[in-house]
Image (cartoon, rainbow, N blue to C red):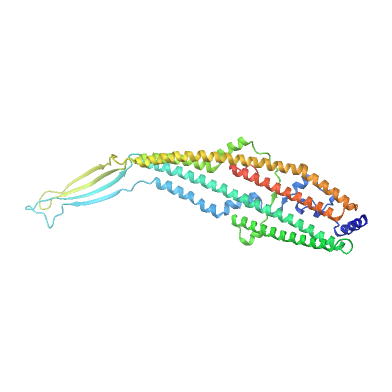
Amino acid sequence: MNKMGGLRGALVWLALVPSCHLLVPSSLVAGSEPVTSLPPPRQLAASDEQPDGGLSLDEAIEMLLQRSYDLRIKFQELPKGRANVLSAGLRNNPSVFFSADNIPYGRYSPQRPGETDFELTLIQPVDINNKRRRRIRLAERAQRVTEALYQDAVRQAIDRLYANYSDVLEAALKVRAAQTDAALQRERVKAIRDLVPKLQPRAELTQALVNQGKAETALRKEEANLIETRRDLAALLAIPPEDADNLTPSGPLRDTAPLPPCEDDLIRIALMNRPDLMAYRLNVSRAEAQVERTRAERIEDAIVFYTPYQIQEFPGQSSQAALGWEAGSLIVLPVFDRKQGDIARANVEVRQTQTEVQGVELQIINEVRQAATDYAVSRKSVERYERDILPESRSVLAEKQRLFSSGREGIDVWLAARKDYNDVVRQYGEVLLRHRRAMLKLNTAVGQRLLP
């Protein structure tokens, strides 16, 4: 294209596009300023937020804890555990035994003397080895394990919420990037269509139309993906299906929180707060209580008999009935069965759970270290984009716009510069989202919400 043609194309292009705020996604632009007055890096980054009035992460977590069907089902394990404690503290019921001995066929007489005995006996098993107390202790420790497992279920559910919430944010960013690309392709088609009769061959218009179709198809795909991720998030939060398509997360993507503690402190916090590790440690205590209970069961309950009324009658004789009482006890001697196998198995379970605790501790340390590394790397990437890449990209774009406006560069160079800048902005959004995921993953790894 010669200089006169470039100038003519510039005039046509400036007439078609009076303002250049479509150079970047609408979510990344403060107002509709011209290209020559682009916002500074911090302003550009800070404006990359989800719309106000949407669903914040705190609100999503609150909804999850209140509505999640999975958590509501697992919560029912807690009253079941309390019921087990109640059952463990119940005592054995007494028994009543009534007997009549020496009842004659017919009647006793002086020629056939005899006596008839009537007895009413109370039978009560007696715990002579504190098995009931050990049962209660075992049930209480099992209840604490159940509570820790529920807390870990909450942690994992929140982690799934983090993932779904981030997926919606990512899908929304991709939709905005696809919208920007589609708008750019539409403008390119308009510009080339006006230039075809004078300067451009028709093949370039055809190629521009093909690119526009690809951009529109990509936009439809990203919009469908956004709808799908919104519905997944709505299902997790038990939101009615008819409201799922309007679900819009809100809040900043940029990390404005103070730096988290160092890696050693993060590991210490995780080893103190992770509910899954607490569940394993409590399970060791439960296994030790199981050993105590099994050892107590070596001696079975003693059976105590008490007969408050014992009547002896002498029918056919002139003597009166005799009254008396009786008491006795039955104790099983632990000669052969002393629960040797059960005790050995309970001791093995203690060692097994102790080994599991060691393995889980090592796994948690690795998870925290990996999460801390991902956080540090992604944070540095964000800082590099804001400090170097974005300012340099804006500088290049501004220079290309100046050359295009003066007619020294053609429209293809100008459109390529716009596309390159939009790609940088899209990559910056991806880096922001990757860092946001790293922040949330660090919360899950330490078992505590250190970062917003």
Left or right, residue 134 beside residue 419: left
Residue 377 in sight from this viewpoint? yes
Q: What percent of the width, then of the height, locates residue 360?
A: 53, 41
Left or right, residue 185 beside residue 167: right
Left or right, residue 297 beside residue 322: right
Q: Nearer the viewer, residue 236 or 56?
A: 236
Count how many numbered circles sit on residues in the image. 0
Residue at the image point whose x is 61% and y is 56% from the top: 232
Q: What percent of the width, then of the height, locates residue 15?
A: 88, 59
Image quadrant for the C terminus?
Answer: top right
Residue at the image point whose x is 60% and y is 48% from the top: 159
Left or right, residue 303 beside residue 185: left
Q: Nearer the viewer, residue 56 or 350?
A: 350
Q: What percent of the width, then of the height, locates residue 243?
A: 64, 60
Q: What percent of the width, then of the height, locates residue 143?
A: 47, 45
Residue at the image point whose x is 68% and y is 43% from the top: 378
Residue 133 in sight from this viewpoint? no
Outermost residue toward the right in this view: 4
Q: Nearer the viewer, residue 319 or 168?
A: 168
Residue at the image point whose x is 76% and y is 43% from the top: 386
Outermost residue toward the left in this view: 111
Image quadrant for the N terminus?
Answer: bottom right
Q: Nearer the viewer, residue 182 or 110?
A: 182
